[in-house]
Amino acid sequence: MYAKILVHIFLFLTLVLAEEAYSGNHSLIIYVTFAPGHGYLPMYSSYGLLDDYRVFSYDSTKGDISSPFRDQASLSNVWRDLQHCTAFKTDYFNHFMRQANASIGIHGPILQLMYGCELSQDNKMKGVYEFSVNGKYTLSLDHDNTHWTTHLPQAKDIKKILDGFILWNKSNQIYMQRDCVPRLKQFYMHSVTTIHRQVSPEVVIAPSAEGPDTLTCVVTGFYPKDITVEWALDGEPVSFNVLSTDVLPNHDLTYQIRKTLTVSAPEGNYSCKVEHRSLPQPLVIHWGMLGLHKAQNASTIITIHVGS
């Protein structure tokens, strides 16, 4: 009995500390895939992202939750709830598949959920709860009245099935309105040093494999994700003849992006300008500079000038 009381006190203090420490705008989004009968996928898998940081994942072939915080006593209630939700959702997914098969002829679909909340610095919450069938038919839960909405006429029969899941919809509403924000703050408290860290980018310009008249500005190893990269000719921004990748993740929780420029004036002075939160001022690399360039830390002032 005393042990249970101590656990409840500990969890209460954890939430209080998370409330006091919280700063910024952050989101907790959970992704679920249910794919029975598709041998290349686990029957049930899920993962949760705090902003862009994976705080947990679950795979039915392994049968357990993995997380960098798996052994944290303050999150024991979270792991217990996730295990319960996995079983609860599996029952409703199976129920949906039986009804969809019988009433609308959908056989062996892949079902997906995306749900969670975003909390602003001023404590305003925005929620999202979406259900998808085969990646084609997406419906959103109106968690004020527990009904599903869609702009797709083809999904009206799916909506009818989901609207009939009264207990599940009510459970989803409770999670969105009561549980999501405290869960976000719990994960935030354990992740704060990771999601608030700043890692400066490494930048290099190299000839592109796409052709002899192309240059690629490779920017990698930076965190957080938001970054501005632009080409310039003789100091003036160039927006035409530029192709860009998306900002892509690296294996070490940093990001990369590449911008490729088709050279229009071979004798011009081309440079790649990078702006990032970790840099005290923009980093400018000129074509012809050798090697990899990196801001060592956020307090280092970098100025690079290359004569023509």
Image: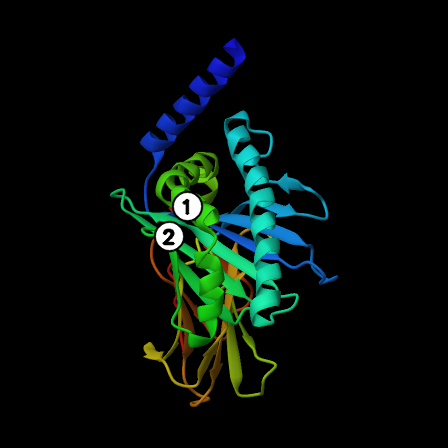
Report if residue 51 is visible in the image.
no
Is the residue marked by circle 2 packed among few (<14), some (14-19), or many (20+) residues within 10 Å?
Answer: many
Q: Which comes sooner in the sequence, label 2 or label 1?
A: 2
Is the residue marked by circle 1 packed among few (<14), some (14-19), or many (20+) residues within 10 Å?
Answer: some
Label tally: 2
What residue lies at 57% left-to-right and 87% top-to-bottom?
Answer: 212
Q: Does 199 appear above or below 154?
A: above
In the rendering, at what x and y percent does residue 93 appear? Answer: 58, 54
Viewer-side residue, 25 vs 114: 114
Viewer-side residue, 2 vs 215: 2
What residue lies at 68% left-to-right and 48% top-to-bottom?
Answer: 60
User: Which residue does the numbered mark 2 point to in the structure image?
Assistant: 146
In this picture, residue 219 sits left or right of residue 121:
right
Task: State the quadrant of the C terminus.
Answer: bottom left
In the rendering, at what x and y percent does residue 28 appear? Answer: 44, 47
Q: Locate residue 180: give its quadrant.
A: top left
Q: Secondary structure at mark 1?
A: helix
In this picture, residue 110 sits left or right of residue 151:
right
Disc 2 to disc 1, C-alpha distance: 6 Å
In the rendering, at what x and y percent does residue 128 appear? Answer: 39, 55
In the rendering, at what x and y percent does residue 305 appear? Answer: 39, 67
Viewer-side residue, 252 vs 292: 252
Q: Does 154 appear above or below 60?
A: below
Q: Does 221 appear above or below 65?
A: below
Q: Amino acid at mark 2?
A: Thr
Report if residue 74 is visible in the image.
yes
Q: Secondary structure at mark 2?
A: loop
Q: Are marks 2 and 1 in contact (CB under 8 Å)?
A: yes
What residue lies at 69% left-to-right and 42% top-to-bottom?
Answer: 63
Which residue, as the protein is rendered here, is positioned at the far front? 103
**Which dot marks residue 170?**
1
Q: Amino acid at mark 1?
A: Lys
